[in-house]
Amino acid sequence: PREMEKMLKAFFGPSADNGRMTISKGGAHLSMLPLPNEGSIALIGIKETIERAEALVRELEAQVEDPMEMTVYWYPCRHSDPNDLSDVLEKVYQSLAYSNLESGGARTQCKEVSEVSVNVSPQQFGVPTAPAVISVPPVDPGEWSTAEQSSQSKHFIPYAKTGSIMMVVRRDLLPKIKELLKNLDVPKQMVQIEIIILERKITSQNNFGLNILKLGSAASQKHATGLSFDASSPKMPGILDFFISRAKSSHFPAYDLTYNFLMSQDDIRINATPTITTVNQTPAKLSIVEEISVNNGVAPVETNGVTVFEKSFSRNQYGLTLVITPTVHQPSIEDIDGKYFVTLDAKIAFDNPQESTRADQPNVDRSTVENQVRVADGEMMIIGGLRRKTAEDAVDKMPFLGEIPGIGKLFGTSKMCDRLRELMVFIKPTVIIDPQEDVRRVRCEELKKRAGDIPEFLECLKEAQDKEKARAIRSSFDIMFGS
């Protein structure tokens, strides 16, 4: 009202009368009474003057925009996810909007809260009534949320299909939002992660001892001694047999004696060198697995109206799973080297299927390693020590004879199995620098130099010195030989 009073005063001409602002122009008088508490102004005068003043007020209000008016702005995201950007802008917008609230509005809000009444039913006496039955709705299974449902913003509506954001904000806060978008919607830094995986599995088995012992009439009554080795046998390949057969003598009964010896070793090496490129603070997942059929038990199957129970199988994956989340730290201004640092949050899980009596129900040992380390750009991190060694020994002895000290080992069988698994992971992160960032950095370094250190200035200075030298030589020749 005060500003409108000044504008009307400048248009009609000022004059004062009895404490009232009376304005006259062309014989017409206009009195104004500003009402600041009501946000209005009262005009007193003849009808034509009042109509002219009213038309002027409406014209001025039409030319001035209301800063509290809501406006719609469409912003296409170039380098950011619209859902993530909407959540950040919503928090900033709420802070800006609430900071501009007047104290009166806060008092009104507090008053409204204090006036809330709580209706409490009076206490009832007598026989207690049964509580009301509450029907709990069934729990629905969880579903994957889409990109449009993941954002909870009210003033910033993301549209994932076009990668844009529709903003419904106040007109006075829109310039600040635009300025903030210039700093938020920038190219995100990416990290190239080179991984070297070295895995080794060694299985050693040693079986030796007595295999056959026959005495008396159960023996073959032959006199034979020999050594046998057959690597192509489908039943027991690679077994060395040493047998002795003797007929009955006057001092010792007939007997057949056979010893078996088996030594086997399996050496498996797995080498993998994958490379992953991911955005800053975005997990990158790598899986090197094998699928194994696992028996899930018996399940009913409908066949021609008859329920038949059949075995059900599923394909499970076992192997190595690596999840890496990089975080890039930019160099500070005081840093002379200007080197980037990367924080790696690595989670490694590897499975080791063991031998089982049933192939469709394997025994699996799972190991998990989680670590967080900070390395410089281009340096390598080594995750080692993931080693597992298992030793199994089994001894079968004959009763009484196997307990004889010294020679008791000749009347038994020993089985030894050693399993060794070792895993080493080499991780090398490399920050992918934006070419525009390189140009900006080189330009900044060049501008920091002194005027005499700039190459362009040195070239111009050398050219000027050469011209000055040529002019001096030409002048000396003119003086000596004449022009």
Image (cartoon, helix red, strand yellow):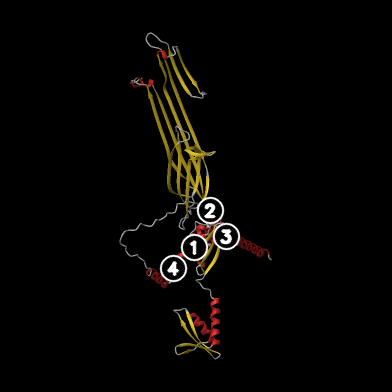
Q: Position of residue 232 (x, y in %)?
A: 52, 23
Q: CA distance from mark 2 to mark 3?
A: 31 Å
Residue drawn at x 42%, y 14% is 219
- The residue singled out by tag 3 in the image is 458
- Residue 154 at x, y percent in the picture: 49, 63
Q: Are marks 3 and 1 in contact (CB under 8 Å)?
A: no
Please report contact status of discs 4 and 3: CB closer than 8 Å, yes or no. no
- Tell me which numbered mark, 3 or 1, is placed earlier along the sequence: 1
Q: Do callouts 2 and 1 mark residues in contact (Cβ within 8 Å)? A: no
Give the labeled residue for mark 2.
433
Label 3 Cα neighbours within 10 Å, binned few <14 / some 14-19 / many ≥20? few
Depth-wise, is mark 1 or mark 4 nearer the camera? Answer: 1
Q: Where residue 479 sits: x, y (%)?
A: 65, 65
Labels 2, 1: front one: 1
Mark linked to residue 99 = 4
Image quarter (top left, top right, bottom left or bottom right) of the C terminus: bottom right
Mark closer to the chain start, 2 or 3 = 2
379 relative to 439, above or below: above
Residue under label 1: 154
Whichever of labels 4 and 2 marks the residue nearer the N terminus, that label is 4
Which residue is pictured at 53% across the width and 75% down the height?
64
Q: Closer to us: mark 3 or mark 1?
A: 1
- Measure the C-alpha gap from mark 4 to mark 2: 39 Å
Contact, CB < 8 Å: mark 4 with mark 2?
Answer: no
